Amino acid sequence: MIEHVPVMVTEICDVLASFDHLERIVDATVGLGGYSEAFLKRWPNLQILGIDRDNQALERARVRLKDFGDRIFFRQGNFRYIDKILKEENWEGPDAIVFDLGVSNLQLSVPERGFSFNHDGPLDMRMGKASNGPAPSITAEELVNTCSFEELAKIFTEYGEERFSSKIARGIVRHRERNGPITSTQELVSVIRQTIPAPVQRKIGRNPARKVFQALRIAVNDELRALEEGIEGCRRTAKPGMIVVFVSYHSLEDRIVKHSLRQWYTEGLGVFLHRGGLKPSEQEILENRKARSARLRAFSFKNVTPYGAR
């Protein structure tokens, strides 16, 4: 059984409770259904459209939430096309849209997906087939084995904020030249461990491959550009009072969200629901390790033209 504990679910429910007569929520990253389950239990008349690019996650969510019947609908798709998806499903202008960004427990827990640096598996990292657009075609293995030293160093620096990007990139290229392609997650971890000095690894205190795996995952799935497009899609589908909630897990995601919400505020489109965002409680961090890096930001649209009146 894959453990799935939704992060900051109480805080999100409190944010959504500020909307009068909450009737329709879009769970833009439904994953294993943790948020949707909490929403459906709290609001008996609520309907949810659950979106996820990962079909394996959707199948598990369907099983988990089957008792809620037609109160929840599912759609496979990438949230970068959220406005198109909502139009196709006749869900324009929902009361709220919720994003739980980052990698899911399902993806991390299945070695064959290639996301985890703790389990051996193929270097894949594709999140799943996208809807209304091209599916990720390149795998992490292809990036690791075909990118030049300069390209790898740039990926690790920009998407992983890795201090030792050049060392690791050089180590990967050297390994390829001597031993052939790197084909598994643990082989890549081994190369990284051989590259970074042992005293530095002890000081880091975590798996030294963590940031490299993050960088490769982001590159494979084009996550940051997808987030930017998804945020813009929210603006296009907004109506007065609509709330958008984001839970991010690293500074790259959070920076994009913060900048976008600030831009909306500057344009007079609405208000922040918490200036500076919210962090999880110390108790939640103790109980759910995934929560330690989470940041919640929320925005309420006020001065936008409603869908259908444009």
Image (cartoon, rainbow, N blue to C red):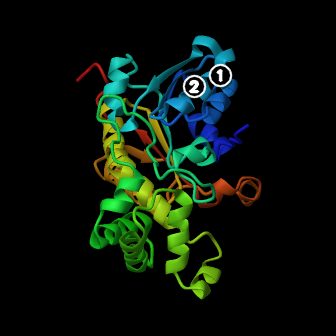
Residue at image coords 60%, 30%: 36
Question: Which is more toward the observer, 95 or 25?
Answer: 25
Residue at image coords 30%, 60%: 146
Residue at image coords 66%, 29%: 37
User: Which residue, given by chain and number where applicable, does mark 2 sit on?
Assistant: 59
Position of the C terminus by quadrant? top left
**Residue 177 quadrant:** bottom left
**In this rendering, would 247 be left or right of 300?**
right
Residue 121 on image: x %, y %: 56, 51
Label 1 Cα crowd, 10 Å radius (few <14 / some 14-19 / many 20+): few
Q: CA distance from mark 2 to mark 1?
A: 7 Å
Looking at the image, which residue sits at the far front? Answer: 179
| Marker disc for residue 63 | 1
Q: Are marks 2 and 1 in contact (CB under 8 Å)?
A: yes
Label 2 Cα crowd, 10 Å radius (few <14 / some 14-19 / many 20+): few
Residue 308 on image: x %, y %: 28, 19
Q: Taking 170 as reference, is 40 above or below it? A: above
Q: Taking 90 as reference, is 162 above or below it? A: below
Q: Is residue 225 visible?
A: yes
Q: Taking 141 as reference, is 39 above or below it? A: above
Q: How many marks?
A: 2
Looking at the image, which residue sits at the far top? Answer: 70
Residue 214 on image: x %, y %: 48, 59
Position of the N terminus by quadrant? top right
| Three-letter amino acid code of the residue under disc 1 | Val
Question: Which is more toward the observer, 148 or 133?
Answer: 148
Residue at image coords 57%, 25%: 59
Question: Which is more toward the observer, 127 or 254?
Answer: 127
Find numbered disc 2 in the image and state the secondary structure of the residue it sits on: helix
Find numbered disc 1 in the image and state the secondary structure of the residue it sits on: helix
Residue 4 on image: x %, y %: 68, 41
| Three-letter amino acid code of the residue under disc 2 | Glu
